Image: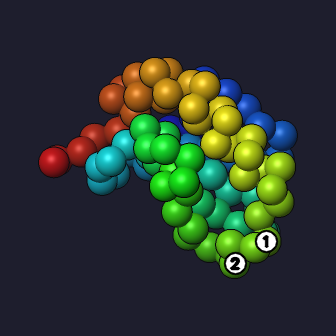
Amino acid sequence: MGKVDCFNLAGIYCWFYSQEHRPPHFHAKRKGQWEVRVFFQMGRTNMIQWKKGPANRIDRRDLDALCEMAERHRAELLAEWEEKVYCDG
């Protein structure tokens, strides 16, 4: 598992699993509250996929911050994905 290095958000842990599926994405979690997948090459309306916790439990500021940072750092995220993630398809 590799940590997302190109940005940090206070209280939110972001990582890539080393063996993952496409399309490129990272996982983000606020401990004890929610976990999402962030498909950083997609548009904002399709970028977030809920993993754990109800969708209405994520604070709008957290959601906006995740989307903004993913949009701002797409190139860096893709470079990290290619370095840290093994895909067989």
Residue in the image at 75% along x and 73% along y:
56
Q: Position of residue 22 (x, y in %)?
A: 29, 49
Instruction: Answer above or below: position of 64 versus 57.
Output: above
Asked if residue 61 lies left or right of residue 43, the reply is right
Asked if residue 69 lies left or right of residue 16, the reply is right
Look at the image and tell me whether residue 23 can be seen. Answer: yes
Protein image colouring: rainbow
Q: Rate crowding at label 1 as few (under 14), some (14 to 19) or many (20 or more) other CA atoms within 10 Å.
A: few
Q: Position of residue 72 (x, y in %)?
A: 61, 25
Look at the image and tell me whether residue 19 can be seen. Answer: no
User: Which label belongs to residue 57?
Assistant: 1
Q: Position of residue 85 (x, y in %)?
A: 35, 39
**Disc 2, SS:** loop
Residue in the image at 83% along x and 40% along y:
10
Q: Rate crowding at label 2 as few (under 14), some (14 to 19) or many (20 or more) other CA atoms within 10 Å.
A: few
Q: Which amino acid type is marked by label 1?
A: Arg
> Residue 14 sits in which quadrant?
top right
**Farthest residue toward the left?**
89
Residue in the image at 41% along x and 28% along y:
78
**Disc 1, SS:** helix
Judging by the rendered image, the residue that carries numbered circle 2 is 54
Residue in the image at 32% along x and 47% along y:
23
Q: Position of residue 50 (x, y in %)?
A: 57, 68
Q: How many marks?
A: 2
Q: Which amino acid type is marked by label 2?
A: Pro
Give yes or no for contact between labels 2 and 1 (Cβ–Cβ under 8 Å).
yes
User: Which label belongs to residue 18?
Assistant: none
Instruction: Answer above or below: position of 68 versus 79.
Output: below
